[in-house]
Image (cartoon, grey):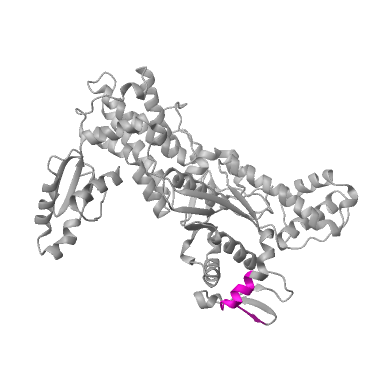
Amino acid sequence: MKSTIYEHIRKKLKQDFVLESPKDKKLAHFATPLAFSLAKELKKNPTIIANELAMLFKEDRYFQKVEAVNGYLNFKLSVCFLDELSQKALNSSENFAKGDKKSESFLLEFVSANPTGPLHIGHARGAVFGDTLARIARHLGYKFDTEYYINDGGKQIYMLGLSIFLCIKDEFLKEKVCYPDEYYKGEYIKDLANEAFLHFDKDFFKEENIDSLALWAKDKMLLNIQKTLADSKIYIDKYSSEKTFYKDIENTINLLKENGGAYEKDGKIWLASSLKGDEKDRVIIREDKSATYLAADIVYHKDKMSRKYDKFINIWGADHHGYIARVKAAMNFLGFDENKLEIILAQMVSLLKAGKPYKMSKRAGNFILMQDVLDEIGSEALRFIFLSKKCDTHLEFDVDELKKQDGSNPVFYINYAHARINQVFSKVQKTPKDIINANMNALNEEALNLLFEALNLENVLNDAFESRALQKLSDYLKNLASLFHKFYNENRVLGSENEQSLLKVFAVVALSIKTGFSLMGIEAKDKMQSPV
């Protein structure tokens, strides 16, 4: 809607301008401060300019009213135009708020948790954000692919195998063992040890087989991670193994050296990242000639940025903030445009239960499992709460609040608006298709503003995607539900003179809620168990 209006106004004004959306829709649906920017150029008062511009829109079918107010040019949409949009939406609900196919392409890497343990609640935030970003992008017409980078090389995988090996010796073979401080703990290690003891022959459990045990356990953990993601309605297009990039480490380091991006010192090879804004240089090859995690990550990003995408997005935990400069420095040295690599940091999450800190998982050892929270509140509540605040801000929530079946629970509150509308249609034994041609000319301003808000979803989606502020979608749905509940409680609908046209407005509201929820990975409910 906004893009259509913008293009229409631009043709009349014959220039680009800023189109704003005033909070008070009684004043205007859209407005522009263009007259202020033209004032200096034309050497005229902005009020005079705004009045002159308003004259260009006389008898314009898009607008009920275009007027100059204190130098602003205010646009009030016509019933005719809103009705056209409503009919189009209800005739093709599967295409509602969709964007045209776009040429820009994206590759998103997210989650990428080490396959050495189950996903914890910190992983959940980036996972939900990334999946929703992908859903919205595709809905808007972008090519948007997703990838999980599996850290299946290095010391942490061996430590997984060693942890299971020692657990088997201790628990099943009854041998005395010494546990390293850094070994993995938690019930999941015992579960893997039990499964491994049943899977392998007893004589398999020797030190020379720890690597094989580690690879077996890594695959098991990856399946566990994929199940948790699937339970959250998160599916990733491609999984890339860190180990597959090892073969290109030497070639990549030689290229870095040629471009002044790497050097040898003290028996190590260093990335000269301080030349590109990092606080210091970083080791990429140790004295024993083994590659650091950064070395493999550089090769992975080199491979990734060689693919034909316009933009590369990574979602990392907030503790990776210092890692950004070194990776971007490496990409610059390798000849890539590091500005094409966008890093989104997911901040920490604090969970409460009945106002007290949520208990750590015994299965995990020292953190809260994503699966435990999913089992308690379900994927829809989990997804909504993680999309309720900007990803780079701290989030705290109480799981008990999300289980309430009343208006204090935002998921329930929005769902109830959708269910209420469905119930109204059931009462009159009609479907949205039955009232699609209802005349809307007699609707009051409040009803038309509710309709405008319902039709504004595509603009919200574009804004949320472009700013990477997905909480704008959850805020929009809460506001739309609030406007609907207020209107429904204050106005007679069934049996009124405007019943058909109001049902048409309600149908668009329901479609907007259903579409918005779907993009958040939530299914809008047609019935609720209890009223607000």
Quarter-of-image position of residue 449? top left
Quadrant in which residue 87 is drawn: top left
Point out residue 499 in the picture as x, y percentages from the top left corner: 27, 22
Q: Is residue 261 magenta?
A: yes
Work out which quarter of the rendered image holds the N terminus and state it.
Answer: top left
Question: Is any atom of residue 224 visible in this view?
Answer: yes
Drawn side of residue 229 relative to residue 155, left or right = left
Q: In this view, does 434 lie above or below 418?
A: above
Q: Which residue is drawn at 60% across and 52% down?
A: 148
Q: In which quarter of the image is the C terminus?
A: top left
Image position, residue 102 (x, y; %): 41, 49
Give the residues drawn in magenta, as a range: 252-265
Residue 301 x %, y %: 57, 62
Q: Percent from the top left, x then y, of residue 373?
A: 58, 43
Residue 475 included in the magenta stretch of the image: no
**Whether residue 10 is situated above or below residue 410 in the rendered picture:** below
Tag count in the figure? Answer: 0
Give the residue drawn at x 85%, y 47%: 200
